[in-house]
Amino acid sequence: CSVVSIPMSEHWSTPCNGPLKPNPDSSGLFLAVSRAAGYLNHDRGWRHGIESFLAALGRATSSNRAWMFEVVDQGPDHYTTKFVYEWASSPEYSEINKPRYDHHRVNINTDDRRAFYESRLNGDVLRHHRNSVGAFLRLEFELQNIQSMLTIPIMVDGTWWGILGFDDCDAPRDYSDS
């Protein structure tokens, strides 16, 4: 039996300037998560329900994209992820078929990349905004036209297994606790 956890520790980036996309009502979001989790209880395994799970969460959060990366390799100086599942609110927001995400290796060769990697290993929820993202993520934000991003490490039996993420491309969002 594996224990899958959604971590509760969080890291914040500097708030973005300008009008923000509203956050969903927290009670509605919890209900959506509860309902969406039912899709993972598929008789053929959770992977058969993941697309419906991401679609339900993406719609409930009014995100442009909900996605999941799986960690396929880790070492003392790198980690490698594979973009395995995605829901996009519209085809122009889809990124899953881009070749650069198939077994994407990240070298942990700078202080900001080391800190980012360690936050993943610790299970920290990360919130990012385009105008305050560090050099490590800046290119991805530009390539994907991301305004705001929320990422949640997926921990299985205490080990970093992957990432659940939400991207907002049409307007910035302040992912607050409310």
Image (tube, grey):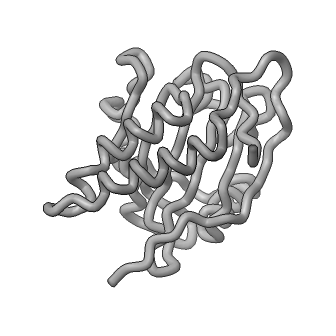
Image coords of residue 81 (percent x, y): 42, 53
Q: Residue at point 27% right, 61% down?
A: 41
Q: 155 or 134: which is nearer to us?
A: 155
Quadrant location of the C terminus in the rendered image:
top right
Compared with residue 21, is residue 112 higher up or lower down, i.e. above or below?
below
Image coords of residue 155 (percent x, y): 50, 69
Compared with residue 2, is residue 173 higher up or lower down, i.e. above or below?
above
Image coords of residue 26 (percent x, y): 65, 44
Left or right of 113, for residue 151: left
Left or right of 31, for residue 26: right
Q: Residue at point 76% right, 43% down?
A: 176
Quadrant location of the N terminus in the rendered image:
bottom left
Compared with residue 33, is residue 59 higher up or lower down, i.e. above or below?
above
Compared with residue 122, is residue 132 higher up or lower down, i.e. above or below?
above
Q: In this view, which residue lies farthest toward the left?
A: 44
Left or right of 65, for residue 175: right
Q: Quadrant of residue 127?
A: top right
Q: Residue at point 20% right, 63% down?
A: 45
Count all numbered tags in the image, as a single digit. Answer: 0
Q: 53 or 32: which is nearer to us?
A: 32
Q: In this view, which residue lies farthest toward the bottom?
A: 1
Image coords of residue 21 (percent x, y): 69, 23
Q: Residue at point 39% right, 42% down?
A: 54
